[in-house]
Every structure is written in C-alpha cells, then in structure tokens.
Amino acid sequence: MPHVFEYALVRAVPRQERGEFMNVGAIVYCAPLEFLRCQTHVDAARLGALDPAMDLDVLRDALRSWSQACDGTGPLAGSSLGQRFRWLTAPRSTIVQTSPAHSGLTDDPQGELDHLMSTQVLAPPDHP
C-alpha cells in the first residue's frame, strides 16, 4: 500500500542576487515509514559555470550538515523527522536552498530518492 511522501530538491545558489542555482541533492520524507534522507552530489565543473569563485568546501560542509540533520546526528537530533524536514525546506537566503516541497505516493521512499537524484541532480548522460 503506497504512503504519502514529500520531497524537495537541494540547490546550490552561488550568488543569490543573480537568482541562478544548480540542483545538488534531494530530500525525501515519509512520515508513515519514519523515513527522512538527503543525498547530495556536487559537480564542480557544472557549478563553476555559474560561479568559478564559489567556495566548494563551504558548500560541501553545508551539505554535510543537511545530511546530518536528516540522519539525526546534528544539532536538530532532538527534533522529530517532520520538524527537521520543515526546517530544512523553509525558505532561506544562503548558498544552500530547497525547491518548494512536493508530495506523492510511494511504497519505496529510498527508490524515490534514488530516482530524484538520477533525474533531477546528476548530469544527463551524453547522447550521441
């Protein structure tokens, strides 16, 4: 039986004033299955096209913090999964932001996360 899940894409925003971003991850939350996970991938070459001077170490540290928030190993460990998801997807003006949250039905939240990563985050394969 499928369960309601929510997801958001994680975006790197090198220069907020330009409004440009690149998807660098995804977060999936499924309350009935007690699932909250974040996966990230930073493609330095693609991100360099937006801002060659972006500090990738700062971005990677921020993304690591987001993963810790999902895993319950960071400062938000005492919060519920739902509270952590809402905090992570709240609008912000930093180099890491999220898309609006979306919802759907699934019986495999990890499969949804893998699908989001392959279709929305990773570069598409080259076509001949």
Image (cartoon, helix red, strand yellow):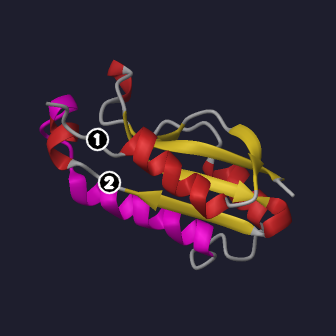
Residue receiving disc 2: 59
Q: Is residue 126 above or below residue 79?
A: above
Residue 126 colored magenta? no
Q: Residues within 10 Å of mark 1 (few under 14, many from 20)?
A: few
In the visual, does 128 lie left or right of 66?
Answer: left
Q: Do the residues under discs 2 and 1 have CB atoms within 8 angstroms?
A: no
Q: Answer yes or no: is residue 95 visible.
A: no
Q: Answer yes or no: is residue 81 visible.
A: yes
Looking at this view, name the residue that lies furthest to the front: 128
Q: Residue at 83%, 54% (x, y): give it.
A: 3
**Residue 27 on image: x %, y %:** 58, 53
Which amino acid is tagged 1?
Answer: Ala
Residue 57 colored magenta? yes
Residue bounds of the magenta highlight? 49-71
In the visual, does 56 lie left or right of 64?
Answer: left
Residue sitting nearer the eye, 88 or 2: 2
Q: Residue at 42%, 66% (x, y): give it.
A: 64
**Residue 18 on image: x %, y %:** 33, 20
Q: Residues within 10 Å of mark 2 (few under 14, many from 20)?
A: some
In the visual, does 118 lie left or right of 32?
Answer: left
Q: Is residue 112 above or below residue 124?
A: below
Q: Is residue 11 above or below residue 43?
A: above
**Residue 103 on image: x %, y %:** 74, 40
Q: Which mark is residue 123?
A: 1
Image quarter (top left, top right, bottom left or bottom right) of the N terminus: bottom right
Give the CA distance from mark 2 to mark 1: 18 Å
**Residue 32 on image: x %, y %:** 85, 63
* Magenta span main SS: helix
Q: Is residue 68 above or below residue 47?
A: below
